[in-house]
Amino acid sequence: MRRGVWHQFGDRSQRLVQEQLEAGNGVGVIISPRDLAFHNAVNYANIYREFGAEVIVDLQFYNPQFHNGLIESYPVNEFRISVSELCKINENQLSGLANSLRIINNDIGSSAILSPALLYEAGRNDLIELNSRLFSVAKSVGDDLGIPTYATVLLGRSANVSEGNIASLLSYATGLNSDGWYFGFEFIQNRIPFNYDDILRFGLALLTLACTGKPVLHSYAGPLSLLSMGFGATGTAIGHSQNLWQFTRGRWEASTGSQGGSGDAPPRYFSRNLWGTFVYPDELIQLPVSLRERLLSPTPWSTMINEHSPLPWSRWEANKHLLYVIGHTVDLISQSANAIDCASVALEFLEQAIQLGNDIQQSGLTLRDDTCCYQNNWKRALLQGLERYRDDYDYLSLLLAP
């Protein structure tokens, strides 16, 4: 697994990701069957590899009964059935699943197999057993193709309510003969994960997987990727839209109507120094020039913006800007020697963000988004993790020392 930032597919991601790779942002791409037809996935995977990126496919069995026109183009579609039916799958059907996985990953040229898996939930031994069977199928395909197999370990909300639950479920997951981990954590639904205890438990889970000595790819990380390497991740996945900023099972449920806000909503500008967004230009122009200068983070997609005369800017350009800022910042963090050093660099960014947020509030402006509300909790959780799990950090440093 290449170390650094991976692009997590969402709606209209294919060309967006290509542009980011062209700009030197990212080491890998995670293709989503929900958002790209199989034949297009094959074509774009070839393009991404031309820019040196690794490509993997997340088959997204989180809700195995979810269907749409794109996801149905994949050979594995016939196995999108109910959980109860999947639990009864026989050996002949498992052979068919293996063949489907082989076709998909061979045609796409995947650098590794991601095992199909359902979310781990508290008290669901049936899901533990099913994920183990699905992993065995994926592992056999990975071995045949001569590429690593990463076990998909996504912890559902019921699994995350206590450290005891997490430790128990991870003891099963880490018993799999995996070459690495594709890790996700279902938070309470906030725009950006906020709760201190959740962040600390998320960090413990990630660090536990990292201490196996095998690489961990933090999926659906979004802005939280600032902490990923500090908790032991090898790679972290970012996406342009808010429904990619954390794992949410709602992405694999049938739409019940309008999703998201109005198309006329103003863009959000992601500030590296604030490590969050503000509404552009509405909130920017309410600040003194000195604070505007500190908020702006120039990228190839924000060159028209300056602190004196804000110009029109599209939401789509704002998406590209966000990916570039997060990607290059996390790339900087990932160059540190170990997880302890990565955490130290992340803490420096958080200190800066907290100070800037305080200065904005003292100017009399309260930002419309929940920006300035989570950085303190992130800082506390990272500091507490470094203190409480110091033995794990030291062990990981020794384990991964050159």
Image: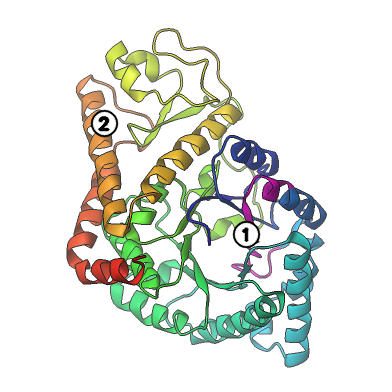
Q: Is 303 situated left or right of 191 in this image? A: right
At horizontal 25% and vertical 55% (from top left) the residue drawn is 382
Please report whichever mark, 1 or 2, sits nearer to the chain's N-terminal start.
Answer: 1
Q: Looking at the image, which residue is at 25% across and 46% down? A: 347
Pointers 1 and 2 in contact (C-beta within 8 Å): no
Q: Which image quarter: residue 18?
A: top right
In-image side of 218 versus 196 (left or right): right
Residue 252 disc label: 1
The front one of 304 and 65 is: 304
Residue 288 visible in the current orientation: no
Question: Residue most toward the top?
Answer: 309
| Amino acid type, residue under disc 2 in the picture | Gly
Secondary structure at badge 2 equals helix
Q: Pointer 2: what residue?
A: 357
* Residue range (magenta): 47-66
Residue 61 occupies which quadrant of the picture?
bottom right
- The foreground one among 378 and 112 is 112
Outermost residue toward the bottom in this view: 91
Residue 363 shows in this picture: yes
Q: Vertical placement of 12 versus 46: above or below?
A: above
Name the residue nearer the viewer: 213 or 362.
Answer: 213
The location of residue 339, given as percent across then percent down, is 31, 58
User: In the rendered view, would you say 399 is above or below 345?
Assistant: below
Density class for disc 1 (Cα within 10 Å; few <14, some 14-19, many ≥20) is some
Q: Main secondary structure of the magenta part?
A: loop
Q: Is residue 53 magenta?
A: yes
Q: Position of residue 207 (x, y in %)?
A: 34, 67
Q: Secondary structure at mark 1?
A: helix
- The amino acid type of the residue labelled 1 equals Trp
